[in-house]
């Protein structure tokens, strides 16, 4: 059984550091191109399959309010299996049990850190370990 936990960061931005065009268009995400020449040659996945594969590998997603609102506008919520943290200073309360509003990156990191601590405590409770510390002077 693997006990390794890690953070995976996936940031979808263009070279200028934005997700959408100045007019708010995100058609690259809502209608991914069929042309997969931008993917590595060994990758036989379509853009949609690659996105789904990435989503299947994570449990928590952090996004900004603007991205959150765009995803909501798309209709079907694609992140129902995930805990979503929405960075916002204007949304007033958590949207659902799985969508939590946080005010800063620091608050998002603290929330994720607390989840990690909670997981670690549960793991140690479920799988007690005997630790031995050997100190030698040389």
Image (cartoon, grey):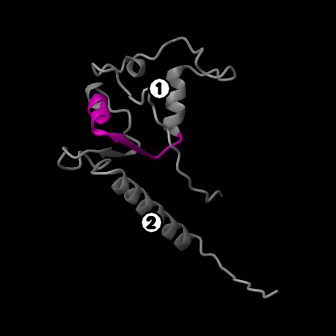
Where does the N terminus fall, quadrant-wise? bottom right
Q: Which residue is at the front of the view, 71 or 19?
A: 19
Say what secondary structure mark 1 lies in.
loop
Q: Which residue lies at the image location 44% right of the left edge and 66% below the top edge?
A: 118
Q: Which residue is at the front of the view, 33 or 98?
A: 33
The residue pinned by badge 1 equals 15
Q: Is residue 72 above or below residue 131?
A: above
Where does the C terminus fall, quadrant-wise? bottom right
Q: Is residue 82 magenta?
A: no
The residue pinned by badge 2 equals 118
Q: Which residue lies at the image location 52% right of the left edge and 66% below the top edge?
A: 120
Q: At which x and y percent is residue 54?
A: 52, 35
Q: Is residue 126 left or right of residue 136?
A: left
- Which is nearer the N-term, disc 2 or disc 1? 1
Q: At which x and y percent is residue 52?
A: 50, 30
Q: Is residue 36 left or right of residue 66?
A: right
Count neighbours of disc 1 (C-alpha within 10 A) and say few if under 14, some if 14 to 19, many if 20 or more. few
Q: Is residue 101 above or below residue 119?
A: above
Q: At which x and y percent is residue 62?
A: 38, 44
Q: Which residue lies at the image location 19% right of the left edge and 50% below the top edge?
A: 93
Q: Which residues are drawn in magenta? A: 57-71
């Amino acid at each position: 059984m693997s006990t390794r936990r890690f953070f995976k960061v996936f940031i979808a931005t263009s070279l200028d550091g934005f997700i959408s065009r100045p007019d708010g268009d995100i058609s690259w995400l809502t209608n991914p191109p069929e042309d997969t020449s931008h993917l590595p040659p060994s990758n036989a996945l379509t853009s949609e399959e690659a996105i789904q594969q990435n989503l299947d590998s994570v449990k928590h997603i952090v996004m900004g309010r603007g991205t959150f609102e765009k995803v909501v506008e798309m209709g079907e919520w694609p992140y129902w299996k995930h805990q979503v943290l929405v960075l916002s200073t204007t949304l007033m309360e958590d949207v659902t049990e799985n969508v939590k509003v946080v005010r800063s990156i620091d608050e998002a990191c603290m929330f994720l850190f607390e989840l990690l601590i909670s997981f670690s405590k549960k793991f140690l409770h479920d799988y007690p370990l005997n630790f031995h510390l050997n100190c030698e002077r040389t």
